[in-house]
Image: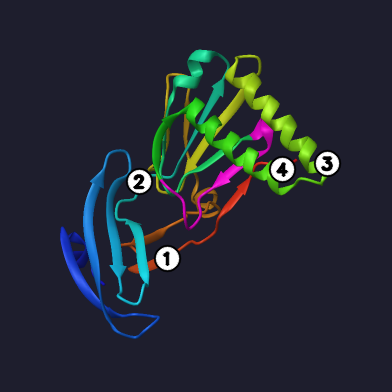
Amino acid sequence: MNQDFFNQERFETKICCPLCQADLVMTWQRDNIPYFGEIMHVSARCQCSFRFADTMILSVKEPMRYEMPVETGEDLNARVIRSTSGTIRIPEMGVTIEPGSVSESYVTNIEGVLQRVRDVLLTASRWVQGDEEKSSRSEELLCMLEDVIEGKRKITVIVEDPFGNSAIISKKVKATRLSEEEAEKLNTGMVVFDVNKSELVNDVSDNVQPLGD
C-alpha cells in the first residue's frame, strides 16, 4: 500500500472472511485526534458474526519521555494524554502499564491515572487470593495509592511514547527526547503504518505489572 492510499478520508476494500470465506467489506476512516495526530479507523463485520476493529497511527512525532514528581494535591490535577502507544511507569511502586492489543487512548489527570492503577490492583488482588505474599503486596500498593492521593506520599509518574503522541502537561514536567534505542524497546500496542518502511507492524503485547517488586 502506498502513502496516497492512506491520504483518502474514507474508503472501502474487500477481503475474504477468515471464518466463513465470504466476501467482506472493510471500512477505512481517516481522522485527526487532538494530541494523538492522524489516525485511521479500520473495521469490518461479517454476517457469520466475525468482527474486526483496529486503529492505525498515520503520524509519528519524536519519541518522548515525560517525568513528573507528584508532591502535592495540586500535582494530581496535571493533565495526562495517553495514546495507545504510551507506557506509564510509577517507579516507587513498581508499577508499569504497557500498551497491548486492547489498549485505549485517553485524556485524564494524574489522579485519574492513579484511579486506573487502583482498579487494576483491586482486580489483581482477587486473582491472588490465597497467595499471602502477593495479597500483602497488593494491599501495600493500595495503601500507597491512598497516601499519594491524600498528599502523604511522593511519587514520580513517567509517560513514554515511541511515537510522541502521549504527554504530561505541567510546569513541573521534565520532557526528554528518547534515543532510537530507547524508543525501540517500548511496546506500541497497535497497528502502525510506517511510511518510511512501507510496512504494517502489529504489536499485540499486553503487559500490566502492578505487583512487581
- The residue under label 2 is 61
Q: Where residue 201 is drawn, which disc sits there?
A: 1
Residue 124 is situated, as x and y percent measured from the top left of the image, at 67, 44
Left of 177 or right of it: where is 91? right
Q: Would residue 156 appear left or right of 142 to someone viewing this image?
A: left
**How far separated are the C-alphas under marks 3 and 1?**
39 Å
Secondary structure, mark 4, is loop
Label 2 sits on a secondary structure element that is loop
Q: Which quadrant is the N terminus positioned in?
A: bottom left
Q: Specify which label sits upstream in the sequence, 3 or 1.
A: 3
Amino acid bearing label 3: Glu
Magenta-drawn segment: 91-104
N-terminal of the pair, mark 3 or mark 2, is 2
Of tags 3 and 1, the one toward the viewer is: 3
Q: Which callout, 3 or 4, points to the residue nearer the camera?
A: 3
Earlier residue among tags 1 and 4: 1
Examine the rendered structure and indicate whether residue 147 appears above or below residue 93: above
Kindly check if marks 3 and 2 are in contact, taking CB atoms under 8 A apart as contact: no
Question: Quadrant of residue 27 in the image?
Answer: bottom left
Residue found farthest to the bottom: 21
Callout 2 amino acid: Lys
Closest to the observer: 125 or 114?
125
For disc 2, the neighbor class at 10 Å (few under 14, some 14 to 19, many from 20) is few
